[in-house]
Amino acid sequence: MGDFGGEHCNTKDNPAYSTNMIAISDLPDGFDPGRFFILYPGVFITLDNFASINFSGLRCHSGTAPYAPEGCEAALLQRAIRVALISYPPNRQTQGNQ
């Protein structure tokens, strides 16, 4: 799949198609859900539960993990979950080449 999480560009994506990301979270009260960034043109999206974003993976992007409130108990930290579902058609699939 290539790089994920940190700042990256999906250089093998087809420019004619967009990537879709859906953030699904189960965070305790008081947690900050984190952000998704499209670095140029400077788009910042809060990853609330079921946030859905369409973007070009060819543009550099990044994100942050959810943030716990100060003094959070360890049991709550272990219960905090966020899943990011990524759907995209890679260039190999859309062009029919290997």
Image (cartoon, grey):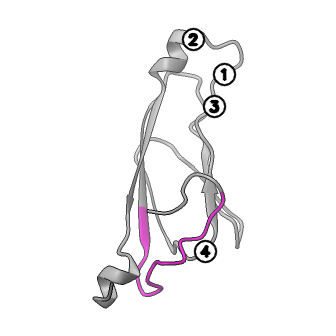
| Callout 1 secondary element | loop
Whole-Å distance between the Cαs marked 1 and 4?
31 Å
Crowding at dot 2, Cα within 10 Å, few <14 / some 14-19 / many 20+, comes out as few
Say which quadrant the N terminus sits in: bottom left
Whether residues under marks 1 and 3 lie with C-beta atoms below 8 angstroms apart, the answer is: yes
Secondary structure of the magenta portion, mostly?
Answer: loop
Q: Is residue 17 magenta?
A: yes
- Horizontal side of 81 relative to 68 (left or right) equals left
- If you read the primary sequence from the N terminus, does the residue marked by circle 4 or circle 2 appear first? 4
Label for residue 1?
none
Q: Nearer the viewer, mark 1 or mark 4?
A: 4
- Horizontal side of 76 relative to 71 (left or right) equals left
Whole-Å distance between the Cαs marked 1 and 3?
7 Å
Residue at which label 4 appears: 59
| Callout 3 secondary element | loop
The stretch in magenta equals 7-20
Q: Amino acid at mark 4?
A: Arg
Residue at which label 3 appears: 67
Say which quadrant the C terminus sits in: bottom left
Q: Quadrant of residue 73?
A: top right
Residue at which label 1 appears: 69
Crowding at dot 4, Cα within 10 Å, few <14 / some 14-19 / many 20+, comes out as some
Q: Amino acid at mark 1?
A: Pro
Q: Residue at x 70, y 72 (%)?
A: 40
Task: Establish if 20 lies above or below 80.
Answer: below
- Horizontal side of 22 relative to 65 (left or right) equals left
Label for residue 74?
2
Q: Residue at x 43, y 58 (%)?
A: 21
